[in-house]
Image: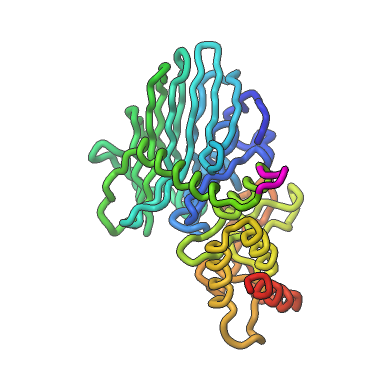
Amino acid sequence: MPKTSKHPSGRLHADRLIGDYALIGSTHSAALVHRGGDIEWLCLPRFDSAAMFASLLGDERNGHWTMRAKDRNARITRRYLPGTVVLETTIRTAKGVAIVTDFMPRPAIDGTHEVVRIVRGVRGIVAMHTEFRIRFNYGEWCPWMERRDGAVFATAGPDSVRISSGVPLTNENFASFADFSVSAGQSIAFSLDWFPSHLKPPVTRDASALLARTVIEWSAWTGRCGYGGEFHEPVMRSLLTLKALTYEPTGGIVAAPSTSLPERPGGERNWDYRFCWLRDAALTLYALIGSGYVEEASAWRWWLMRAVGGSPEELQVMYGLHGERSLTELELGWLPGYENSRPVRIGNGAHGQRQLDVYGSVIAAFHAAR
């Protein structure tokens, strides 16, 4: 995990490294959280959905969710709660200590997808600032904002988001923000709930109960690990990442939760990796089976069988989360890219390439599964 650092300046992408982003996820989608407190990448309800926070590839105008201390000299440390992908950020100022807990629970039965942030006071009083700037369709669409039923709603096209806040929010310039303080022993919860815009808002779920359930579910999963060697911690963290990148409804595993992060800053080799590559299949199966996660390996094997079903001549190098074969590549001209690495791409034209190594990858994957 990243070491202690001073809080960055308010400007996004001021000397920000890819390694400074932590992953939280729900096994349906994921978010990237910078050590300074900004969620800069979020796609809901799926990994490959259009991002509503896309400042990772642009700036604050393209959507983000800030949760930080007002004191710019605050000291920041981070960790994952053991055996989970629940992120815990400790903020230390001259006047107190607070902890921000970020997580994404498994979706509700009604299809609601949530991102939850809980700010808890540990010592003294810490002055905080939060800001929501939702921009649907990869930072392009400014939503219709309204306040009702004690929450703030943002809607554009097929997407709606409800922002539930433990402190009053001010709405200005199609953004919502608040300055507040948290005292020792006090907890303040914030929740972002996504739902289809043509449906009624879902029932709000209790943040503390969701946190407890999410920790229990992840801890139970890591408790099944069969690896007991000297490298247990890094192995377990790698397995948790594989699990967090798994699309639970189908068993497919994406190569990454994001698009267009370049191989070299400023370069053009920046592709959309929110898809499932066949060459990853064998290594993934060996890792899961060798660690005792046979159910996940089986789900991945069945995803593979469905995706490649049909004529061997039609085999592709990659497929979508449900085995989709058409992954049309587009360029998003309104986003400058990470460290000005243009173009920003969604979809991946490589799905139409002939790469003969994939036949060996499929055979190796089925051998591992057997």
Task: Magenta stretch: give its range.
Answer: 228-232
Q: Where is 197 relative to 31, above or below?
A: below
| Residue 350 visible to an observer of this rendering | no
Please name the predominant secondary structure of the magenta segment in the image: loop
Give the image location of residue 183, x and y in percent. 41, 17
Residue 318: name its quadrant. Answer: bottom right
Give the image location of residue 203, x and y in percent. 26, 47
Number of marks present in the image shown? 0
- On whether residue 12 falls in the magenta region, the answer is no
| Residue 16 visible to an observer of this rendering | yes
Give the image location of residue 319, x and y in percent. 59, 71
User: Residue lying furthest left in this view?
Assistant: 149
Give the image location of residue 163, x and y in percent. 35, 40
Work out whether residue 144 or residue 319 is closer to the camera in this orientation and state it: 319
- On whether residue 230 falls in the magenta region, the answer is yes
- Residue at 45% across / 40% down in the picture? 133
Is residue 212 rendered to the left or right of residue 349? left
Look at the image and tell me in which quarter the C terminus lies: bottom right
- Residue at 61% across / 88% down in the picture? 311
- Residue at 42% across / 17% down in the picture? 184
Q: Where is 146 relative to 324, above or below?
A: above
- Residue at 59% across / 51% down in the picture? 225
